[in-house]
Image (cartoon, rainbow, N blue to C red):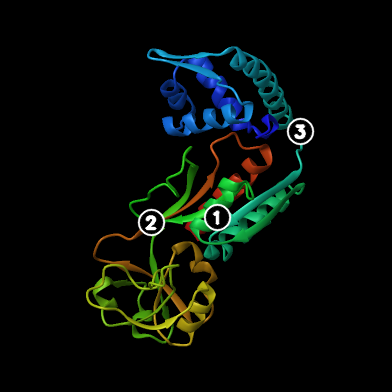
Amino acid sequence: MDFTDVSLAGLRVVREVAERGTFTAAAASLGYTQSAVSRQVAAVERAAGVPVFERRREGVRLTTAGRVILRHAAAVLDEIDAADRELRDLPDETGTVRLGTFPSAGAVLLPRALTALRRTNPSITVVTRDGGTPVLVRALRAGSIDLAVLGSEPPFRPPDAETPALVTDTLTERNLCVAVPSTHPLADNDSIHVDDLRGQRWIAGRTSGDEPQLGVWPGLEGRPDVAHIARDWLAKLRLVAAGCGLTTVPAVIAAAAPAGVRVLAVRGGPEERRRVVVAHLPRPLPETALRVVEALRAAATQTGAS
């Protein structure tokens, strides 16, 4: 292995361990697990071909080679940090932000955010892709997107179990709703009771495990009568408009319901809360990405009020 293959993350870990004196203290400072710190140090040592630290009962101490590595690592990291600070202070910053979203966010939230962003920050270019949470989280970890808008449901766990943990910011949290055909008897009400959902026909999607997912109201007794399976949320709503059944929808896309569909709140039973969060890697966001987050937050607030 060539030492030029060492990552910036590895150099940062070496610097932190050298400063803190133990792997445990460095892990706490960086927000990593101790095993993650050990893996980063081991990768640097493999690349260097020599030990970086002398392990002792009371902690660690840099070897002679480790002191050489730390000296150059500090210079590299200082230059990177200085460039980051300088770029973040540039006025009227332009650039491209790569944004991933869960599919239904593209119905209302994303168009509203991009419309506002073109007005307030026309120099920022946003490129988007959609996907489920596992796909978007892997893209974040790989560095192929900068931000991810994700749907989340109780108990609202982190998007993945990797370290360091992703940073998440809640954009909106609202109750799950039900879309019904406008010709359905339930459509005459502004809201419906959960008991009214028993015995209804449903339009659902599927998870990667091929089990029905979003579409059937959670917690209903017995086996649901799933009449149609559709992966695309718009296809599900079109089937609702055609009178083929009911489907659950996040409140954030209620404004995008097509003609022939009513989106209703559900009373009774446990609340079915759903969050929309924006996630990113645990590092300072550039100004362009911060402006995109602000636009998403404003769009979520507007959507919640409409």
Q: Position of residue 44 (x, y in %)?
A: 59, 28
Give the label on residue 136, or none: 1
Using the numbered discs, state the Cα–Cα distance from disc 2 to disc 1 in whole angstroms: 16 Å
Proximity of marks 1 and 3: CB atoms separated by less than 8 Å: no
Instruction: Give the amino acid type for the residue marked by disc 1 in the picture.
Output: Leu
Using the numbered discs, state the Cα–Cα distance from disc 1 to disc 3 in whole angstroms: 30 Å
Is 5 drawn above or below residue 221 in the view shown? above
Question: Circle 2 is placed at which residue position?
Answer: 153
Q: Residue at the spot x=66%, y=53% of the render?
A: 116
Which numbered disc, 3 or 2, marks the residue closer to the eye? 2
Using the numbered discs, state the Cα–Cα distance from disc 3 to disc 2 in whole angstroms: 39 Å
Among the two numbered marks 1 and 3 on one chain, the one whose residue lies closer to the N terminus:
3
Among the two numbered marks 3 and 2 on one chain, the one whose residue lies closer to the N terminus:
3
Give the label on residue 91, or none: 3
- Dot 2: within a 10 Å radius of its alpha carbon, few (fewer than 14), some, or many (20 or more) residues? few
Instruction: Give the amino acid type for the residue marked by disc 2 in the picture.
Output: Glu
